[in-house]
């Protein structure tokens, strides 16, 4: 179990729907991205057009959201992240 899950379990806070079904959301995003690339290639070109230093805005938002959860948990529980 990861440390963020242990903290949530110790605090007795129930997991939200997003956290509980995170694997499902990731799978659905992969399927949606694949279908978008197959059936609407112009849309994928539009999304990748806003690229800066080989990083698309979509990827930057996804990475930011993944980093937000552990930072939020640490702030709630008064811990410092090194």
Image (cartoon, rainbow, N blue to C red):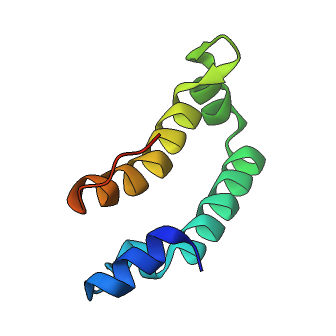
Counting from the top left corner in percent of width and height, residue 54 is at 71, 17
Residue 79's quadrant in the figure? Answer: bottom left
In the displayed structure, 1 sits above or below 45; it is: below
Side of 70 relative to 2 (left or right): left
Could you tell me which residue is drawn at 37 percent across and 86 percent down? Answer: 9
Residue at (72, 36) in percent of width and height:
41
From the viewer's side, name the closer residue of 7 and 30.
Answer: 7
Q: Residue at x 49, y 51 (%)?
A: 66
Locate residue 34, reporting x and y percent: 74, 54
Q: Residue furthest right?
A: 38
Q: Nearer the viewer, residue 53 or 5?
A: 5
Quadrant containing the N terminus in the rendered view = bottom right
Q: Is residue 39 above or below residue 2?
A: above
Where is residue 56? Give x, y as percent: 60, 25
Q: Quadrant of residue 35?
A: bottom right
Q: Is residue 13 above or below residue 71?
A: below
Q: Closest to the observer: 3 or 23?
A: 3
In the rendered view, tell whether residue 61 sits above or below residue 7. Answer: above
């Amino acid at each position: 179990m990861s440390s963020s899950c242990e903290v949530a379990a110790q605090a007795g806070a129930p997991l939200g729907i997003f956290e509980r079904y995170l694997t499902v959301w990731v799978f659905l995003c992969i399927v949606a991205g694949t279908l978008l690339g197959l059936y609407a290639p112009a849309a994928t070109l539009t999304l990748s057009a806003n690229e800066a230093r080989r990083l698309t805005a979509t990827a930057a938002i996804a990475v930011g959201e993944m980093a937000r959860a552990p930072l939020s948990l640490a702030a709630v529980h008064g811990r410092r992240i090194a």
